Amino acid sequence: MNTSSKQSPNINPHVSVDCVIFGFDDDKLKVLLIEQAHPNKETHRLALPGDLVFENEGLDEAAARVLNELTRLKGIFLRQFHAFGNPDRVSNDKDKEWLETYRTDPNARVITIAYFSLVKMEEYNPGTGSFAAASNWVDIHDVPELAFDHNQILDKALEALREEINHNRIGLDLLPKKFTLSQLQRLYEVILDRPLDKRNFRKSIKKMHHIKALDERQTGVNHKPAQLYKFVQVKKIALNFSLLHLFQE
Amino acid sequence: MNTSSKQSPNINPHVSVDCVIFGFDDDKLKVLLIEQAHPNKETHRLALPGDLVFENEGLDEAAARVLNELTRLKGIFLRQFHAFGNPDRVSNDKDKEWLETYRTDPNARVITIAYFSLVKMEEYNPGTGSFAAASNWVDIHDVPELAFDHNQILDKALEALREEINHNRIGLDLLPKKFTLSQLQRLYEVILDRPLDKRNFRKSIKKMHHIKALDERQTGVNHKPAQLYKFVQVKKIALNFSLLHLFQE
DNA sequence: GTTAGTTATTGTATAAAATACACTTCTTTA
DNA sequence: TAAAGAAGTGTATTTTATACAATAACTAAC
């Protein structure tokens, strides 16, 4: 089982990272998937962006690098949420075929450290050309069978995402720098998958010290322009606010 | 950097597991540490129980095995909480010396998957002889400098533990099968590190569907015997109770 | 068998937070 | 200037959290 002798010297053949990038587009929650390079049509599948880590590279670092290499995304805050390491993670024949074609050490037992993030989709839309060609945003409710154990990783990522917003640790990258409260509310609604009351939501927001109203309003809309808000860095003061109640059934 | 050729064939030289076992003894929160095997006095240090995983072994499985091998603990529910993989995890000279003595592949870059659990200390007391000789319960407030990055792992485990109790997912192994409410309260107090009001605590407990009063009372105490309670399995009903409010500062 | 010691047990009043609910304002465009 | 469309706002009710202290039940020592 000692198979690492063929491996490129600076790649760790046993450890990979996978990234679950959720995208928010004002309306839907999607996830970023890449098309696996394919030796032939049958093995062509969608997968989470991920790859082996380098020997001299931290895990967080590796996740950022791999994500950038595969999707051109950069500067995204990635949060580690779980390590997956069942020996039978790779049981499907298509997966094995892929490994034999693309890995110098196809039989190595690989454990993967999974990360997730939630980004503003418009900024990273494949249509804008800022992406590697083979990246796709796929609606969360419409994800096909993925390579390896990536469906399982995705499920766990969704759980983690909901816990994050629960703890009010939503990435600040989710909305434009200046956003309206309606946009913020839609973000919460999409993640929580249920409607929220506008007035109560706004009352909650007022208690959040890291969300501040600006002296500006929306432009270019054909209705009353909304006030714009921004996220601010909170220093010492512990965030004593949360939307935890949204999660108690 | 390809150093795995010397490694025993069924050990993965790049992936380890570490276990942070918290012990609750009615009064204190402690953590289980082992004394590293030591080539000489200088390198003798305390560490979390942990070791490399086997190639054909799941991570959870490896954690259970390693914990058992090092401490004789068995059947404990271990919860994965983080993977640590900085390339400079092993920077201390003592750590390097230890690796060179005890690992066939001392320069391999190792990432570790960390698990934690919380157990009832009396059942696993080193004094009872059920332990490997070199295991020690150490008060959480009195942990010395540990090997590798184990202090950092411990800190993160404490965080994770508090989140667990927060979400009401305390392991049921923490108390005797039949326990008093005072015991349960002490458990919460020790983990949260602050006193709780008895009456309010009991009000909260009454709302927990998974804690049921028995028709029995304590015996062998020199004071009013307390009513005994037990944990029950909750099936479909979502736990709609939590002690989350205890955490909002 | 009385007393001292020790822990168990209980309720209420107040404050804070969550929720339910509907109309008016502002801006754009036809 | 009317219509469309989203923004914005307040109050009453319910639920939850918190603060707080006296009595009951048992044992052990005298």
Image (tube, coloured by chain):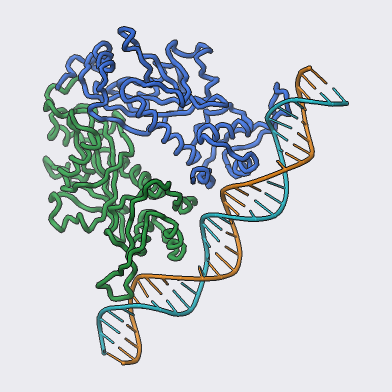
Chain colours: A blue, B green, C orange, D cyan
> Which is nearer the eye, A117 or A248?
A248
Q: Position of residue C4 (x, y in %)?
A: 34, 84
Q: Position of residue A184 (x, y in %)?
A: 58, 33
Which residue shows up at 24% across the image and 56% down it?
A: B121
> Which is nearer the eye, D10 or B208?
B208
Q: Position of residue D16 (x, y in %)?
A: 52, 55
Q: Position of residue B209 (x, y in %)?
A: 40, 54
Residue B42 visible in this rendered orientation of the protein:
no
Total marks in image: 0
Which residue shows up at 28% across the image and 14% down it?
A: A98
Q: Would residue A232 be found to the left or right of residue B95 on screen?
A: right
**Which quarter of the picture shows residue B106?**
top left
Which residue shows up at 19% across the image and 27% down it?
A: B107
Which residue shows up at 44% across the image and 12% down it?
A: A132
Residue found farthest to the front: B236
Tell me if residue C21 comes above or below residue B82 in the rendering.
below
Give the quarter of the figure containing the N terminus of chain A.
top left
Tell me if residue A72 comes above or below residue B76 in the rendering.
above
Q: Would residue A55 be found to the left or right of residue B135 on screen?
A: right
